[in-house]
Amino acid sequence: MDGFHLKKGEEKMFNKRLLKTFKAEMKNVYGLVLIQWLVLVCHILLTFLHSYVLSCLYLKQSFSLVFYLLSVICLFALKCFLQTTQNKQALSLTETIKTKLRKSVFLIRYIIKNKQQFLKNRRLLNLQVKVLIN
């Protein structure tokens, strides 16, 4: 877990070895980051709308209640949709990575368990190659 420790003058957000292992899933990671940014923008806009309405009420200025309500409803619906999409995509990505890791671990355990057989087959293969060359 060297990717999660902070080194002197360097911060790591992700385990780089894990990212190198699963390069095919990087587009999904980028999609998740993009969705998080869009949710952040929705939060900022909602905060701006609320503060605008509160300032108008405090200063006794007029504002369009219909525009405010429609904006809040649309932004909230967009935020909920984005978060649902993000959760589904994160779950799918997690399942994909877990499946690949399980297959890798199974293969490693199989190789370790049958190490002597693999070495014997490798020696036999080397002898066959030598015979074919000669």
Image (cartoon, rainbow, N blue to C red):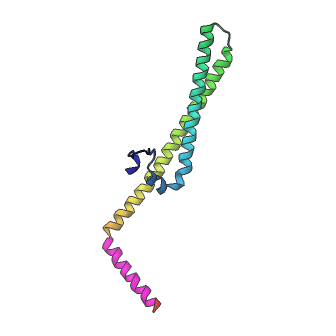
Residue 22 lies left or right of residue 127; in this view the side is right
Residue sitting nearer the eye, 64 or 3: 3
**On screen, residue 121 above or below 88:** below
**Left or right for 28, reference 121:** right
In the rendered image, the quadrant that contains the C terminus is bottom left
Residue found farthest to the front? 9
| Residue 107 position within the rendered picture, expressed as x and y whole percent measured from the top left | 39, 63
Question: Considering depth in this image, is 74 or 35 the residue closer to the camera?
Answer: 35
Identify the residue at horizontal 52%, vertical 55% (top origin).
Answer: 23
- What residue is rendered at 34% in x and 76% in y? 119
The residue lying at 38 percent from left, 46 percent from top is 5
Magenta-colored segment: predominant secondary structure: helix
Please identify the quarter of the rendering in which residue 125 is found.
bottom left
Inspect the magenta stretch and tell me whether residue 128 lies in it.
Answer: yes
Asked if residue 38 is positioned above or below residue 113 in the image, the reply reads above
In this rendering, would 126 be left or right of 81? left
- Within the magenta stretch, is there residue 125? yes
Q: Residue furthest bottom?
A: 134
Residue lying furthest top in this view? 60
Question: Where does the magenta region start and end?
Answer: 115-132
Query: Residue 96, position in %: x, y?
Result: 48, 51
**Left or right: where does residue 79 sit relative to residue 133?**
right
Where residue 45 sits in the image (x, y, percent)?
61, 26
Name the quadrant containing residue 58.
top right
Give x and y (percent) for residue 29: 53, 46
Q: How many marks?
A: 0
For image coordinates 66% across by 9% down, the residue present is: 61
